[in-house]
Amino acid sequence: MATAKAHRLYVGGQWVGDKATLDVIDKYTGETIGVVPVASRETVDRAIAAAHAAFPGWARTPAHRRFRILEKASQLLATHQDEIAAIICREAGKAWKYSVGEVARAVETFQFSAEEAKRVHGETVPMDASTAGEGRVGFYLRCPVGVVSAITPFNFPLNLVAHKVGPALAAGCAIVLKPASTTPLTAIRLAEILEEAGVPAGVFNVVVGSGGTVGEWLTTDPRVSKISFTGSPPVGESIVRKAGLKKVTMELGNNSGTIIEPDADLGAAVPRCVVSAFANSGQVCISLQRLYVHRSIAAEFTKRLVAATAKLKVGNPLDKDCDVGPMIDEAEAKRAESWIKEAVAEGATVLIGGKREGRVLQPTVLANARPEMKVMCQEAFAPLVSLYEYDTFEDAVRMVEESPYGLQAGIYTNDLRKAFHAIERINVGGVMINDTSIFRVDHMPYGGNKLSGLGREGVRFAVEEMTTIKMVMIKP
Ligand code: NAP
């Protein structure tokens, strides 16, 4: 058997090892595909110190130079698209077509970041609007916050890292990144690309290790000015408690709902719902989990949804035509399977799927779901969608809204009055009309309300969150 490649961490512009290591496995075959050092406290300390030292120089680097470096990073990602997709595919278990799609999105995220580097600016303030301001000139500047700790999840090991690294570099911040322990190889490859693109030593650092140690040190270190976290609500909440007065952005979970009205174009809605529920084995924060279908079209919609689900190819994500690969680990697959069994015991019906083999859970459609079932009221994060038949649109909107989460929601309707009713009533960060909750492009404002988080990403909005305002008043 070939020996797995030994990787290094990227700290202060150097590739460094550490005593302890962790094995990264192919999530489908179980083969070890990489060995990565686990950062000790000293290594994390060196990384933060390097970022802290590099920050003032990077903050003063002219915008046109930051633009060029980010643009080069984008081009390098595009050049190595297939090679990086293969890393994502194996370490995250993401089907090939979605892994390639993730790299394509990260190419855009870095390109948007390059463009934003030229647009970090404040504005003038009409001081004479107050009698006390008469005769004075006022304007504010947008200044980079300093060192950013970026802590990221396993499900988009490249593009969700790009959503923190690109805007931070554009804003003039230095970064220490801690990727998920199950998927660190993509982040290490990104560090090579950023080094080649010309990011100066210390401005970008990658340390790997558990959330409870490395994540905690990155959260509590006083040299860190901002924590940008994407992950589960409980971890997000614990970080916010420990962050003190640091700025925070929290991109957390959801149990996304979508409503299908009788006037929906089922030819468009059904295939879109299938992709929205099962892409990346449902391990997407805006994955379609709760599907509210008007009773008058429920039988036809359900028949078509089940037929389309039956056509999905489940198996090795490296196969070019694979639709659904494994989940991130067996414990998570078992947890999702147990939720399905519990829902069935409480009266739900499995229309298709429900079976598990190791980490692979078959794409599952449940009917007769009720709001209090775990598959409805908690985040499933699995290839699992539950159907609820409703009678009135207002009821459906109320049920989508009655969630502790608030990331995104979808509504299929051509009735503007209904669309605006939903837009007004559902407390989420994004409402998608004639699409499902899963729609996202990387420059739109993106983030959640309630348990789904704090602040927004989407490059321009992340740049705003990585800068602080400095007001200047001049009395000539
Ligand atoms: P997770 O368990 O919360 O882990 C996310 C990251 O936090 C990992 O790097 C993890 O490290 C680290 N971490 C764990 N405990 C920590 C602690 N005490 N202090 C600091 N860091 C800590 O989430 P996940 O399972 O990887 O991802 C799934 C979740 O992310 C879902 O809830 C999903 O909805 C959410 N998500 C949200 C968005 C969004 O944009 N809103 C996007 C994608 C995913 P280890 O890997 O070492 O445990």
Image: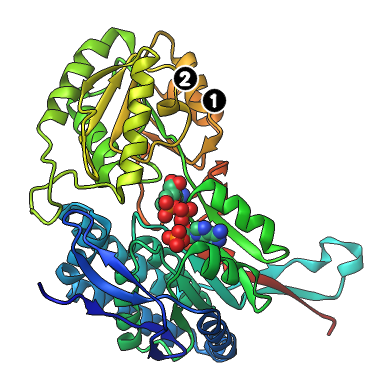
Image vertical order of residue 305 relative to residue 327, above or below: above
Q: At label 1, which amino acid type do we have?
A: Glu
Q: At label 2, which amino acid type do we have?
A: Pro
Numbered circle sitting on residue 88:
none
- Residue 455: image quadrant is bottom right
Q: Quadrant of the C terminus?
A: bottom right
Q: Residue at x 34, y 15 (%)?
A: 348
Mark 1 Cβ inside 8 Å of ligand 1: no
Q: Is residue 68 left or right of residue 400?
A: left
Residue 273 x %, y % = 26, 32
Q: Residue at x 25, y 77 (%)?
A: 75
Residue 120 x %, y % = 54, 73
Q: Mark 1 and mark 2: span between their CA atoms?
A: 9 Å
Q: Residues within 10 Å of mark 1 (few under 14, many from 20)?
A: some
Query: Element type at marker 2?
Result: loop
Q: How many marks?
A: 2
Numbered circle sitting on residue 371:
2
Q: Earlier in the sequence, mark 1 or mark 2?
A: 2
Marks 1 and 2 in Cβ contact (< 8 Å): yes
Q: Nearer the viewer, mark 1 or mark 2?
A: 2
Q: Quadrant of the N terminus?
A: bottom left
Q: Tell me the residue that label 1 is attached to.
A: 402
Q: Residue at x 15, y 52 (%)?
A: 317
On the question of residue 152 being in view, the answer is no
Q: Nearer the viewer, residue 138 or 361?
A: 361
- Residue 249: image quadrant is bottom right
Q: Nearer the viewer, residue 128 or 112?
A: 112
Residue 349 x %, y % = 28, 15
Q: Residues within 10 Å of mark 2 (few under 14, many from 20)?
A: some
Q: Is residue 141 left or right of residue 32?
A: right
Query: Element type at marker 1?
Result: loop
Residue 209 x %, y % = 45, 70
